[in-house]
Image: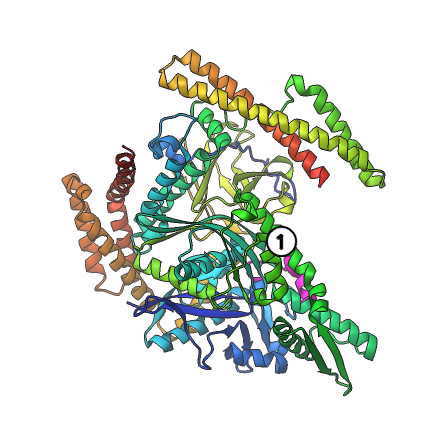
Amino acid sequence: MARTVGIDLGTTNSLVGYIDPQTGAPKCIPGPNGSALCPSVVSIDEDGGVIVGEPARRRLLTQPERTIYSVKRLMGRGVADIQDELKLFPFRIDPSSKNVIRVRLGDKFFTPPEISAFILRELKNWAEAYFGESVDRAVITVPAYFNDAQRQATKDAGKLAGLEVLRLVNEPTAAALAYGLHEKQRGHVAVYDLGGGTFDISVLKLISTSEGDIYQVLSTNGDTHLGGDDIDNLLQAFVHDKVLQQHRVDFSPHSELAQELRKELIALKHQLSEKESATLRFRLPSGAVFVHEFKRANFEGLIRPIVDRTMGPVRQALVDAKLKPSEVEEVVLVGGATRTPLIRRTVQEYFDRKPHTELNPDEVVALGAAVQANILDRGVSNMLLLDVTPLSLGIETYGGAVAKVIPRNSTIPASAQEMYTTGVDNQTGIDIHVLQGERELAKDCRSLARFTLKVPPAPAGLPRIEVKFLIDANGILQVGAKDTRTGEQRTMEVQPSYGISDSEIERMLEESIEYAEQDFAERQAIEARTEAETILAATQKALVTEQAASLPRAERESIDAAVAALKESISGSDYKLIRKRIDDVNQATMHLAELVMNSAVSTALQGRKLAEV
Amino acid sequence: MQNRGEGGAPPITPKFSMSAPSIVREKGDHFSLFGLPRKLWIEMSSLEQKFLELSWKLHPDKFVNASPTEQELSLKSSSELNDAYRVLRDPVARVEYLLELEGMRKEGEHKQQAPSELLEEVFELNESLDELREAKASGGDLGSLKSRLESAEKNFQEKLGEVDAQLQLAAKQWDAAIDADAGDANRKAIMVRLNELLNRRSYIRNLVTNVQKELL
């Protein structure tokens, strides 16, 4: 069976990890130059070839118009959202793009998921070269505070890179998993994660049970546009002003000179984490050299506003977890930016506790992703992650107000049902607008989707349509509707407000390099066969349970017939037929699966009752 | 009435319930999912333990290699488990849910009018809030207004505490009525009382939130 890996798709760097079967410990996989850090930079050369990582980063200086960094900032966002970023980042956006951004690299346009897919594919290649076998399943991490659209965009990127995304795991949760293995911690843990472009704070409870360890997230908060990049931007603006004053030199923040300066300033920032002062010497096009000595104290004065901005979410997360700072037993620092001494001091003072920094803050998320990939791959394990949704889910009501149906920090999967009816006779549609966020008005929340429920003509108030909103274990919304009078399931086209539609993804997949090399139908047949084998194995398992023994003969016969038909179809290459027979087996075993699941639940409850006696 | 213009409210008639998943109608309710009677006192540590045990059985992470049917069932039942736990562990949400379950509290029918004996105090409070907003807008003196509002907030916080105590008392009466297998009339009377207290609580809670927002 092909390998499963854990991937940290970061703003600045991306990494891929796996579990070493010998030691059982998570490890990061090095790339061709020996480093496990793959700079999240993509460049397109003149022939249309894709360059990723360190070589692409070097091209930031020589080919800035063909190269992009920090693309994570654009994931799941619309053009209107990123106007502020455009002042600071050299993103060249297709002026005609609206709800899906298209970025120009050379003479071609790419969506953020496509660019992220290039990074994922590079990491997939690293892992395949390392193992000498194929890698087709992955856990990918996302900032805990990512909304639905940002998560969906990340999942799309995985799909475009030819990976089955087993789960999106929140970055701070992944870090806690890595530390949990490392430290055997128990009790309440706060994870402070300041990465290149995003900030997250998560509060977890680590619980030991007879079946294993549970990592339960109690609350999460953050800012998806706050990170080390912002420190760089501040430094850059500071130096830019000084250069203008002293040398009367003004340069565009998008120029090659600005990229050169940025590189110098990042090195300087790193020095200031080690030393009390560092000096910038920057050669201007005129030949003059700008010299400025930064003392750590000045630097800290400059970046304090950024550090302060992280503390609001920290306080809110603790309030939501119903904990005082002193009740948090362990604090973990994650993300390269937490090497900054000011951040370490601020966090330590707030919790009155020395934070953990033992694991490499650049690698810890990928290590945790590898742990979760291993848990999921094996299906059964002595660890379980219970995560939450970071933002409340709401529906627009009269007057543009928002009614919350799933509160933030609800354990996922989470769901809500709402009943809808019509306001006038023979109304044929009910418009529904789904939002995410904490504000009271729809215009201040993030629009996730708008859709129209189709209703058969009837007197006002008679139709009863139940809409189910479900946030899955990836934090992604699913919507289903049912006419409760007829029991009829209603499907609806839910058009996401931001993001790429399913059909567009399909088209991109068909056009992508991998599919060009291999016949589409053949590829589909391989995928369908793999899925069929999984189902046959699962069905076999269900058929030897007690519940299966008690099935009526007719039901058992229809299962056997469906299984035989599916087995017969997988020897052929008609993927549509295989898919149809997979559906048939699913239909035939639906009732049995329910029986088995119910029995698991009642066994759990009985176990509890016995223990109580 | 397909008013789909920009920014206009959609012509929907949503009725919002606390939480009434399909399991309520199909198989059972939040209480029965946890093997509990419909009583309001719940032992928290045992509820948590059951929640964790059921999570081991139902969480989608345990079904990654299972058939799509099993995956779908896992998604459905683990979301129902999480929804049930979210409601039952919160004492107020639990009362609201019980009343909905018993048909006492209709979806969306949450009364928001001021309890009569509070009318005068609420009137004064709203006046102070208006004055504070005006003073903020015109840059006037906020000090004395703020301290007036702070003491009003303290006053309403105390009232909230009283309502919570009364709610607890009524909850005990409910549990006693269930234990004694009391008649419908008796149970109905307790539910009416619980419902009044919930409305009162939500009204005062909103007041406190509004004051806190202005004082920030």
Does residue A102 appear in the picture of this structure? no
Quarter occupied by residue B6: top right
Left or right, A342 with reference to A160: right
Location of the N terminus of chain A (image quadrant): bottom left
Whether A85 is among the magenta residues is yes
Location of the C terminus of chain A (image quadrant): top left
Label 1 sits on a secondary structure element that is helix
Q: Coloured how? A: rainbow
Q: Residue A476 in the image: state x and y as whole percent.
A: 47, 51
Q: In this view, does A569 lie above or below A235?
A: above
Judging depth in this view, the residue of A210 and A551 nearest the camera is: A210
Residue at 45 percent across and 41 percent down: it is: A415
Q: Name the residue under label 1.
A: A311
Quarter occupied by residue B161: top right
Q: Is residue B110 above or below residue B216?
A: above
Residue at 51 percent across and 78 percent down: it is: A51
Q: Residue B72 in the image: state x and y as whole percent.
A: 35, 47
**Pointer 1 indicates a residue of which chain?**
A
Mark 1, Cα crowd under 10 Å, few <14 / some 14-19 / many 20+, is some
Does residue A20 appear in the picture of this structure? yes
Residue at 59 percent across and 63 percent down: it is: A197
Left or right, B32 with reference to B147: left
Magenta extent: A74-88
Q: What type of secondary structure mainly makes up the magenta span?
A: helix
Q: Residue A142 in the image: state x and y as whole percent.
A: 50, 59
Tell me which amino acid carries mark 1: Met
Judging depth in this view, the residue of A32 and B6 nearest the camera is: A32
Whether A365 is among the magenta residues is no
Q: How many marks?
A: 1
